[in-house]
Image (cartoon, rainbow, N blue to C red):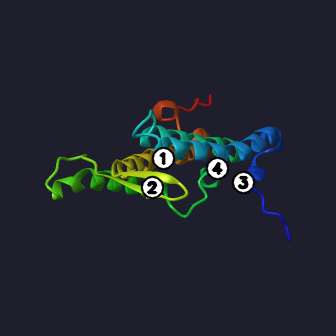
Amino acid sequence: MPREMWLPEALDVPRRERSLLLELVVRMLFPAVLVLSVYLLFAGHSRPGGGFAGGLVAGQAFVLRYLAGRSAEAAFPLPLTPRSVAGAGLVLAAVTALVPLAAGGTPLSSAQWYWDVPVLGSLHLATNVFFDLGVYLLVLGVCLKLLYALDRVRDAGDTLAPYGGPARRKAVT
């Protein structure tokens, strides 16, 4: 059975520009950085962190993967677009913020539940974790959209001038 490559797009990078060490380090760090981002997401309501910090850390994990593979599609190999990730996050955060109004409460108010689970002990769930999840997805989607934009600019090469101005060409005399 043939082994599947982790970043097949890295083979398209010219050999002199490719870094095997970077690819190895990114392959080892990528899952750990994503786990750290999820930890920051769930630790947010009682400690520093939350959706924004977790989303930024997750975005940086995908930036690492982009640096190794030099392709935004390789950095985010899911069938979702960055726009749909950001949109889902915005909708989730907005709905979570506005649902308490329907129940007669104030916007962004939170409900909390506690359960005693025999093996795990006491579990605590607050509805503000859904708001944090929406912010997490929104920030991650924006980071991924920036990667896709960076990929487009890099692929365009010399056709785009710096700072978005018209490209100046030297007159041939």
Query: Which amino acid type is shown beneath numbered disc 3?
Result: Glu
Mark 2: give few (<14), some (14-19) or many (20+) Cα within 10 Å.
many
Expressed as whole percent of the image width and height from the top left, the position of residue 53 reads 47, 37
CB contact under 8 Å: marks 4 and 3? yes
Q: Which residue is mark 2?
A: 85
The label shown at residue 140 is 1
CB contact under 8 Å: marks 2 and 4? no
Mark 4: give few (<14), some (14-19) or many (20+) Cα within 10 Å.
many
As helix, strand or loop, the secondary structure at mark 3 comes to: helix
Query: Which amino acid type is shown beneath numbered disc 4?
Result: Ser
As helix, strand or loop, the secondary structure at mark 4 comes to: loop
Q: Which is closer to the viewer, label 4 or label 1?
A: 1
Residue in the image at 73% along x and 53% along y: 7
Q: Who comes first in sequence, dot 4 or dot 3? A: 3
Q: Which is closer to the viewer, label 3 or label 2?
A: 2
Residue in the image at 83% along x and 43% along y: 15
| Residue placed most toward the observer, 94 or 148 | 94
Residue in the image at 48% along x and 47% along y: 140
The label shown at residue 71 is 4
